[in-house]
Image: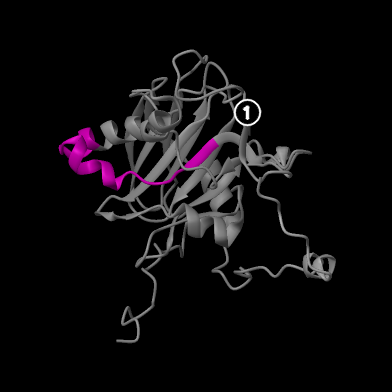
Amino acid sequence: MTHAPNPPADAADRRAVKPVICYPNETLPEVPLAMYQAALAGAEKVGEVLVPPREARTFHVPAGSFFRIVSVEGPQVGDLNLHNANDLNERFYSGKTRALHGTHLTTGERMWSSFPYLRPMATVVDDSLHWYGMDEYGGSVHDVIGTRCDPYTGNLLAGSQYHHCCHSNLTRALAEETGKPTAEIEGMVHDVLNVFMCTGFTRDTGQYFMKASPVRPGDHLDFLAEIDLVGNLSACPGGDCSSEHSSDAAACYPLLVEILKPQDGALEGWESPVVNGYDRSHGS
C-alpha cells in the first residue's frame, strides 16, 4: 500500500499564502451597458429559431443586433457555440473567457474569441437568472467550466454509442450549416457556454458537478452580437441536468432563439471591435 508522505513542517504557512488574480480585468474595454440595455428595450424581433430537444440548430446575428435564448415549455439547459460568420476559424474561447471573467457569466460580461483574434464576440446584456448568484455548494449558472457532453467520454466511461449528446448535436448542425461532412466539420465544434446550466466544483474533491437548473419557462439570456455571428445551440439531452446527461431518459424541452434588431441610432457611436493588436511575431 502506498502512503501519502508526511506534510512538511511549514505546510500550514504554504497553504495560507493569499491568492493573486491572474488576469486583473479593470483595464478591459468598458462595456456601455446602459446604452446596450436601452437599445435592447426598444429592439424589434426580426426572426427566431426553435431548437428541438436533443438537437441543435444554427442561427445568424449581424453585428449590432441582439439575440435572446429563452426557456420554453420546461426547464432546459443549452450548449452554445459562436463563430465569426465571415471566418469560422474565429470561434468562442471559453478558457480565456473564464480567465478574464470567472467560472460563470452574467450581465455585462463578454464571450471572447480564440487566438489570434481575441476580441469580444458577444456581450451579455440581460440575464433573468442573475439573482441566483453563487449557492452554498459553489454552484452558479451559465458556466464556462464544462466542455459539452460528448460521445467519446460516454464511450470511455460507459461503453455507449450515443449520438444526441451536445457535441454530436452541434457537429450535425454545423455540418448542415456549412454543407460539409461531419468528419470534416467536427473539429470546428468547441467548448461552450453552458446556458442556464447550474454547475460548480466540489469543495472536497474539486470535481465538476451539476445540479437542477433554476431556469423556468420565460427565463432568458440576452446578448449583443459584437461581430457578425453564426450561433449554434444544442438543447442538452440532460434536460435541466438534475440527474444525468447524454441519455434519452431525462425530460427535455425546446429552447427558443430570438433575433432582435435595435432601432436606428440606438447604438450611436458603437463600433464592432477590431481583432487583437498583438503583432503575431512571437519574438521571431
Tell me the element at label 1: loop
Q: Farthest residue toward the front? A: 1
Q: Can residue 32 be seen in this view?
A: no
Q: Residue 200: horizontal and vertical position, in percent?
A: 65, 42
Q: In this view, does 86 lie to the left or right of 213?
A: left
Looking at the image, is 27 positioned above or below residue 261? Answer: below
The residue under the point 33% across, 24% down is 163
**Which quarter of the figure has residue 180?**
top left
Q: Residue 53: horizontal and vertical position, in percent?
A: 42, 20
Residue sitting nearer the eye, 183 or 108: 183
- Amino acid type at mark 1: Ser
**Which residue position holds label 1?**
213
Q: Residue 242: horizontal and vertical position, in percent?
A: 61, 23
The residue under the point 37% across, 34% down is 152
Within 10 Å of disc 1 (Cα), the crowding (few <14, some 14-19, many 20+) is many
Residue sitting nearer the eye, 59 or 258: 59
Q: Residue 75: horizontal and vertical position, in percent?
A: 57, 21
The residue under the point 33% across, 43% down is 189
Q: Is residue 118 visible?
A: yes
Residue sitting nearer the eye, 223 or 24: 24
Looking at the image, is 53 positioned above or below residue 138? Answer: above
Please check the rendered image and state whether residue 3 is part of the magenta-colored stretch, yes or no.
no
* Count of residue discs: 1
Please check the rendered image and state whether residue 187 is part of the magenta-colored stretch, yes or no.
yes
Identify the magenta region. 175-195
Q: Quadrant of the C terminus?
A: bottom left
